[in-house]
Structures are given as C-alpha cells and as structure tokens.
Image (spheres, rainbow, N blue to C red):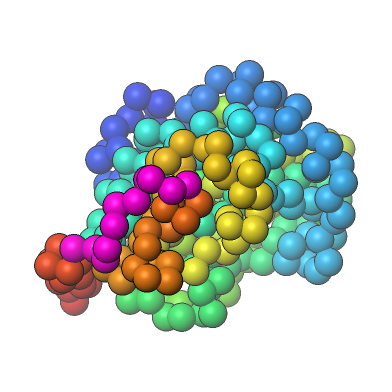
Amino acid sequence: MPIERLPRTASPERLAEILARDGCAVIERLAPEGSMHSAMDELAPWLEATPAGPDAFSGRRTRRTGGLVARSPTCRALIQHPLILGTTKQLLAGATSFQLHLTQVIAIGPGEPGQPIHRDQWAFDFFPFPMGYEVQCNTLWAMTKFTAANGATRLIPGSHRLEDGLRFAEADTEPAEMSAGSALFYTGAIYHGAGANRSDATRTGLNLTYARAWLRQEENQYLAVPQEIARELPDPLLRLMGYARGAYALGYVDDLRDPLEVLRPGRSEGGLGDLARANEQARASRPRG
C-alpha cells in the first residue's frame, strides 16, 4: 500500500481521517525550505556536540539532538503549527488534552543500517493499548531531502491495525520520500523504522511528537527548557509542553495550584478540572469492538 500524499492545504479532519485509516501520510511542502535552513542554523552547534547513538536501535552513526524548545525559535513555531495541533486533537479525541511528547533532530550518517521496525508507543513500557486506540500523533519534518537511498523513514501503511509484537523486514515497508519542508505524519501504533543510509550524505529530520496528556512524556520538557527561558514563552506553548493539568486531577502543584501559576504567577486557571466533562470524554473514547 503506498503512502498517501496531501497538499499543505489539507484540513486537519481529512488528515486525521487518513491517519485513522492508514496510520501515516505525507504533507507536501508544509513549511518553506527556508524554515528548515533556519532551524538547522539555530541547532548546528548543538547537533555538532551531540555524540552518536550507543546502540543499534538509536544508531551508531546517528545523532539525536533534543531540547528544541529551548534551543530553536523556529522549532517553537513549528511545534505549534495549526495543522499539527488540529490533526492531533482529532486523532486523540476523547483525551482531556494532549501535550508535547518529544522534540528531536535525527541526523542519520552515511553507512547507517536500517533501524529495527517498531512502534513508537512501545516506549510506554510496551503496554498493550487496545487496537484502534491511538495515544500518539507524530511528525517528522524533512530538513534535508528524504530518499530511499539516504535513509528515508520506512513504514507499513495500515499496520497500526495489526497485532502487537510482530516482526518485519525492510522489504515489507514503504519509504517516505519527501522534499525539504515536507512532513510525515504517523501514529504511535504504526510499524516503522529509519531506513538504511546508503548515500554519502547525512539525512536530517525534525521529529516533533505529541501524546495524550495522561501519559509520561518521552522528553522531560521541564528540565530540557530552563525556567528562565520558559518564563518568556507564550502560554499556549507552555501548556503544550506540560504546564497544564493532564486530566481532572493530574499535574497540579501542592495546594491544587495550576502549574502555570507556579512558573508565572497570575496565569492560573485554578482548582481541579471539570470532572463531568472528563467522564463524558472517557466514555466517548472507549474503543468499541
């Protein structure tokens, strides 16, 4: 099954529909190529200082640089892209809220073999989520051109509806080839992996992922972004990072204080969440089999 491709004018509803059906889709030229150059310039010193991965899964010829909210103004804007937030809200319907799960530049060097095919939601201690219940909405922006030869991410469209713990080979997958500025959207349940880089150049992608707010974030945003920087960020980005309750009674501070009140007094929503609304959302989001 080929990977569906949509124009940047696609609606969140249409994209979420395809993600529910196929588990993945590419949005062509979602951002200007210049935005990718700006992000690369801002992150170059950090990327150069990042060591290669320690094992075959993370990639011994691959650098993974995080902390992008603190390090890149361009990435802050991309994190809040309306198509991403609108699509995530649709895909993760039923959750009280969702939050930023991971920010990472992935630079795959020449000679890196293909990554084992996996599901990103296995990061949650391999918990067997019910089939059809998505907990993540992921994006991978092409900072450089993605080709089958240089390590484009490889996916198995439709595999988000398969059983857990399956094993696949590269021949079972499709490469998400993209021009710089395009973005791959994929769910946490789809089987995928970085392709082998058989070229003589580095393939660089920008991985921005989101998850239901009652799950622990893969990247600890509170420590990755120093408070002196966090205090200067806009409220919507801070709440997306996790300075908000994740559900009715998740994430408050000491005497039921709103997390944003602690960081920046005077911005509190106060108290706990809306219990009746939380119950209604929970009932609506239960998988039906």
Main secondary-structure element of the magenta-colored stretch = loop
**Residue 117: % across, % down:** 61, 65
Is residue 165 visible in this depiction of the protein? no
At 12% from the left edge and 67% from the top edge, which residue is drawn?
276
Residue 161 drawn in magenta: no
At 52% from the left edge and 25% from the top edge, which residue is drawn?
31
**Residue 179: % across, % down:** 60, 28
**Residue 27: % across, % down:** 45, 33
Residue 172, by quadrant, is bottom right
Q: Is residue 129 left or right of residue 217?
A: left
At 64% from the left edge and 27% from the top edge, which residue is drawn?
36
Residue 69, by quadrant, is top right
From what the image shows, is residue 187 above or below residue 183?
below
Residue 133, by quadrant, is bottom left
At 80% from the left edge and 52% from the top edge, which residue is drawn?
62
Is residue 7 visible in this depiction of the protein? yes
Q: Is residue 242 left or right of residue 107?
A: left
From what the image shows, is residue 70 above or below residue 257?
above
**Residue 18: % across, % down:** 32, 46
Q: Nearer the viewer, residue 134 or 153?
A: 134
Q: Quadrant of the C terminus?
A: bottom left
Q: Nearer the viewer, residue 244 or 31?
A: 244
Q: Is residue 120 left or right of residue 270?
A: right
Q: Is residue 20 left or right of residue 51?
A: left
Q: Nearer the viewer, residue 218 or 128?
A: 218
* Number of numbered callouts drawn: 0
From which residue to which does the magenta span run? 264-274
